[in-house]
Amino acid sequence: MYVIIIGAGRTGSTVIDLATKDDHEVVVIERDTELAEEVSATYDCMVINADAASKDILLEAGIEEADALISTTESDSVNLMITMFGKQYGVETLVSSINDPAHMELFEDLGVNLVESPHRLNGQYLYRAIQHPAIQDFMPIAGEAEIFEATVDEGAPIDGLSLIDADREDLLPDETIIVAILRDGELVIPQGETDIQAGDIVTIFAGNGPTSRITDAFTRA
């Protein structure tokens, strides 16, 4: 995955660390020279020491080829401008931090995949947004185990199947349990015959974490 990360502060540095460890192709744009030099010396990635709120700089970073764009600056106006450039150039996954909840609607109207409010603002959440865009929220349990939410896409492999049928088709790995379904604002506690429907928000326990095999079951190819 080709990932452009804007900002190498506390949040951005966590995203950089996670993305480079997973061997993604990473480009970092950081206007602070000292931070830019530190990232360049620490991580295997391209670093551009410049202000990212510039179309020319984003083009230099390869925005036209990027799979994901993550903006982590402390300025919502800068994050919004960068995200708008990402939208213009067709970046599939747009992720931004947000510092003032009053600006949330602006980002949502732009179609940003995930906007992190201050009480949950950390690099792990932002990075998870590009790893598994289908996941809306998650909570680590112990070891690799997690509980997380995902929305069922229309036409996804599990759409229209009962839990029994999904098990017969081996769609989900062992140690994976659908523990709840939110459907049209109503909570459904699933049983074996319960159908999974497009638009459902499902709460999933995954003993080995949210692997691609799990998220692919809820996502239309």
Image (cartoon, rainbow, N blue to C red):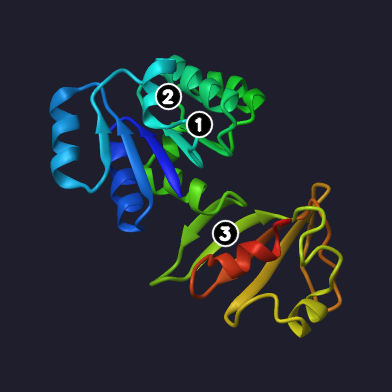
Residue type pointed to by label 3? Phe
| Camera-side residue of 178 and 212 | 212
| Label 3: element kind | strand
The residue positioned 77% from the left and 76% from the top of the image is: 166
Task: In the rendered view, tell whether residue 61 sits above or below residue 45.
Answer: above
Q: Position of residue 105 (x, y in %)?
A: 62, 22
Q: Position of residue 60 (x, y in %)?
A: 37, 26
Which one is in front in this view, the residue at disc 3 or the one at disc 1? 1
The answer to the question of whether label 2 and label 1 lie on touching residues, with beta carbons closer than 8 A, is: yes
Q: Is residue 105 left or right of residue 99?
A: right
Q: Is residue 108 visible?
A: yes
Residue type pointed to by label 2? Leu
N-terminal of the two: label 2 or label 3? 2
Task: In the rendered view, tell whether residue 117 sits above or below residue 76.
Answer: below
| Label 2: element kind | helix
| Camera-side residue of 47 and 161 | 47
Whole-number angstrom distance, CA of label 2 to CA of label 3: 35 Å
Q: Which mark is residue 59?
A: 2
Q: Quadrant of residue 200?
A: bottom right
Badge count: 3
N-terminal of the two: label 2 or label 1? 2
Q: Residues within 10 Å of mark 2 (few under 14, many from 20)?
A: some
Quadrant where the C terminus sits is bottom right
Residue type pointed to by label 1? Glu
Q: Which residue is mark 1?
A: 64
Q: Is residue 196 left or right of residue 209?
A: right
Q: Residues within 10 Å of mark 1 (few under 14, many from 20)?
A: some
N-terminal of the two: label 3 or label 1? 1
Q: Which residue is mark 3?
A: 148
